[in-house]
Image (cartoon, coloured by chain):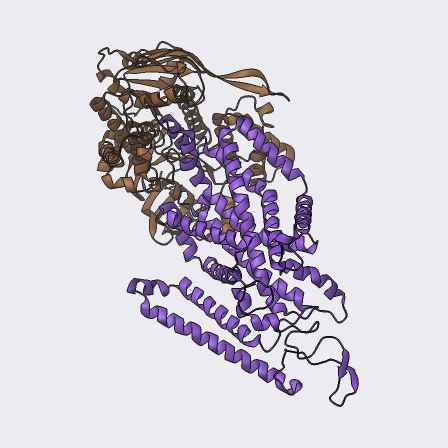
Amino acid sequence: MVVLWTDALIYLLIVVILALGLHLRGKEHIKRPLQQIGRSKIGMVSLVVLLFFVLIGLLDSVHFKPTDDTKNEIISLLDYWATPLREHGEKTYSAPFATKLYSKEMIAMPDGSMQWGYPRLEFGGRHLNNPEMEKIPDILQKALYGLAQGASLIVFFMLLMWGLLAEQHKRLMLSSTAKTVLAVVFVIVSFSYALIYLSPYYHVFGTDKVGEDVFYQAVKSIRTGLVIGTLTTLIMLPMAIIFGILAGFFRGWVDDVIQYIYTTLNSIPGVLLIAASILMVQVYMASHESDFTSVIVRADTRLLFLCMILGVTSWTGLCRLLRAETLKLREMEYVQAASALGVKQGAILLRHILPNVMHIVLISVVLDFSSLVLAEAVLSYINIGVDPTSYSWGNMINGARLEMAREPIVWWSLTAAFVFMFALVLAANLFADVVQDAFDPRRSGNE
Amino acid sequence: MNNPLLVVDHLNVTFNHKQTVVDDISFEIHAGETFALVGESGSGKSITALSVLRLLPNNARLNAEAISLHGDNLLGRSEFELCKIRGRRIGFIFQDPMSSLNPVMTIGSQIEEVIKLHFNLPRDAVKQRALELLQQVELPEPQQRINDYPHQLSGGQRQRVMIAIALAGQPDLLIADEPTTSLDVTIQAQILALLKNIQQQTGMALWLISHDLALVSTIADRVAVMQQGKIVETGLTSEFFNRPKHPYTRKLLNALPSMQSCLMHSVEEKPPLLQVSDFYCHYPIRKGLFKRVVDYVRAVDGVSFDIQQGKTLALVGESGCGKTTLGKSLLNLIPGSGRVVINGVELNALSGEALRRQRANIQIVFQDPFSSMNPRMLVGDIIAEGIRALHPEVSSEQRKARVRQLLQQVGLPEDSALRYPHEFSGGQRQRICIARALAVDPKLIVCDEPTSALDVSVQAQIIQLLKTLQREKGVSYLFITHDLAVVAEIADDVAVMYRGKIIEQGSVADVLTRPKQAYTKKLLAAVPVLKTDH
């Protein structure tokens, strides 16, 4: 097993989230909003979609070197299961579900003569003898078969779960929210099963310029998007929380210094800083080539630095919010009562200020996540995002610049990137709305 | 008076289909009379008023036989028709003059807006009418003030503007929902006199909603008492206050603090616990690029007083006179200068760790029981916080035992320790705050208006609790309040504060019965006293 830097941070993040979950378990002020989220249909559905993306991202974060492979290549669990997708490379562009290339070539005919036409694909629809006649019935048959398999699998698991559940949980499962969630799980599992079933035989989203499967690219991009969304937050949060609370609580020169730092940072264009730091990383990697032997390690380092620099440029907004909230909280009577009781300032910060700004942190983390995923796409588009060799929606969109100019137009790369990104960002935004409603004391009205 | 102006017949209001807020009430208001609806907070009196105008929140369901104005049933009217009745035939004054005026419009244009809405008048006439209204509500210099923004006016003046807006439609009925609750006593008296005066001039009916029985007794013709959504007693004011029939009404009347109680206090002398001399608390006003200090706000301007052991000194004054600042700066929550000696230790000479050690001697109980506890902490942890900070050597078992004991002392069940503050009512929260202050065995507790956010009956309980604790533990109180009736109940000595200075101090009987200063006399005169013919 090989642990890349971003993998390690992702594992760390999961451990932190689990620990936080254990710590907050049974705390009334956290439990109540969580129950409200649990009751919201939109919240739970978007959470299921998000978790599905996270699951794919996690599968893609377990890297190892295959023992039977002669090439010096690091692959992930996802790559391992998607080996047919990964290795079924065509020559160049082909449309979704196509059996022939998208551009004309000289084809060697069986009788030895050469003919100008669309050659058959190497892998897409290879099992068909007469593509024109057999293709559509074959696709429908395979899709239905995949759907049926996926559906029966999920029904089997649901029945198994039902059998194992205790009586009071069964009543919970009959609530309308739970039914909606189960329906969404059912749809997601059967459709992805159908896609998995189809993908060894066809390129469901077509292939790109070098003949790589676009569906595979889009799925691989999930990890990049998630890493940028979460790791950046991980880097940004400590700075925003510590600086924001200190500035608001101590005021005076501490406040002046911190305000000076973030005003300065805010007045430098973020793109400039990001471009500079990405270039620095590239120069560093070029001069220490022996440390970055594999392409994937190199791409990973660049991704990590992108997260860091995005984190450094994006903590100021949250910091400002937290400073304002702390300024308000420090005048609250319970804080005054605590200092009248002789509680030390550190303890006041930890026990009275921090828990009371956590709802703002939570809301802005979920909101920032979707904007960071979009930011990656924009940065990759202007070539200062992730490494051009790594898979990301930004890179796919960047490539689509030329594809859109072709005649006939190549639309599937852009569409695939758009559909995946849209699903993730929409789910994250809807979830953020629900979280915001639940944790904002003014809206939930319980405090 | 055979034809009632407003009839409310079997009115029910429920929230979210289950929580009944107004429970089958019926009453009528006659033209030209003053009708008072009295009840504690949450009894449904404001909701009753709002449902007459159909201004209820979205999750409320209204159900009634009839709500009719001049025999005209409002229930069948459309929203559009109701808009013509609101403001025109029924005027409304809200409780909080700070938030009921639009801060970005001049008061003149806010009054003119209402006039234009209801009367088709030329522009000059509208302006003239607005000016007349401001004169009618006795706003000083209406010519100049008409172009002022709300923030340029004081609380009492803003309430006058609110009344002017309510009068602009020349209504037959004026609903005043706690019109004086957020105002000082002297201003409160002025506003009530004004309302009464205007009522006599115009002959409109006044529907007063209040929690203050004493205030109601001075102004109303008829009174109705509401308890948990029901009207439990209705009657003419004279009968009502002399011969209350319902037990709840009697309980309310008994809970009222009375000015007479001060005469029963003992006058035995005790050694002083706290000595404050020449105490100042000035805030610098900074201006300009380099934040030069150009002047000072003299919040507390050279006060001296003593508090004896086991006694209560009441600090009385109107809002903004510096009484809260003084209380907080005694605890070093706000920087102040002067000599503060408690129990022989000079507090001002201390700082850092030594000051932290001395914190146990003075504790504070705040006015607002809702913001004075961390909503994210368990009640047990809140009470134990002081013990943890000042006596870290105490084991957690002992601490828990102490918390149980404290909860019992303030009259709360022991399992309260494992609950969160928001699960408690205002009075219960104030008990928790008292327990928190008691946890470190203080010699003196500064009580900063601890009862002013509470209902009368709860207020009486809290004062009783404070008195009991004083008897048992010999703790002294600095009781900050604006309510002279409460002072009479609890205090041994009184200090009257005015613009940062103490202008009069002495024993409670002396100050309340034989005031020397004109300001004290004015304060005393403004306190509404229950009118009963004995």
Q: Is residue A444 above or below residue B91?
A: below
Q: Position of residue B337 (x, y in %)?
A: 44, 14
Question: Which quarter of the picture shows residue B515?
Answer: top left
Please tell me which residue is depicted at 30% across the width and 64% down the height of the picture.
A166
Any idea which chain is the purple one in this picture?
A: A
Q: Quadrant of the C terminus of chain B?
A: top left
Q: Quadrant of the N terminus of chain B?
A: top left
User: On the picture, is B260 further left or further right than B199?
Assistant: left
Residue A33 visible at all = no
Q: Nearer the viewer, residue A240 or A63?
A: A63
Q: Position of residue B461 (x, y in %)?
A: 26, 31
* View extreme (bottom): residue: A111
The colour with which the image depicts chain B is brown
Q: Nearer the viewer, residue B275 or B140?
A: B275
Q: Is residue A428 above or below residue B492?
A: below
Residue B518 visible at all = yes
Q: Position of residue B5 (x, y in %)?
A: 40, 41
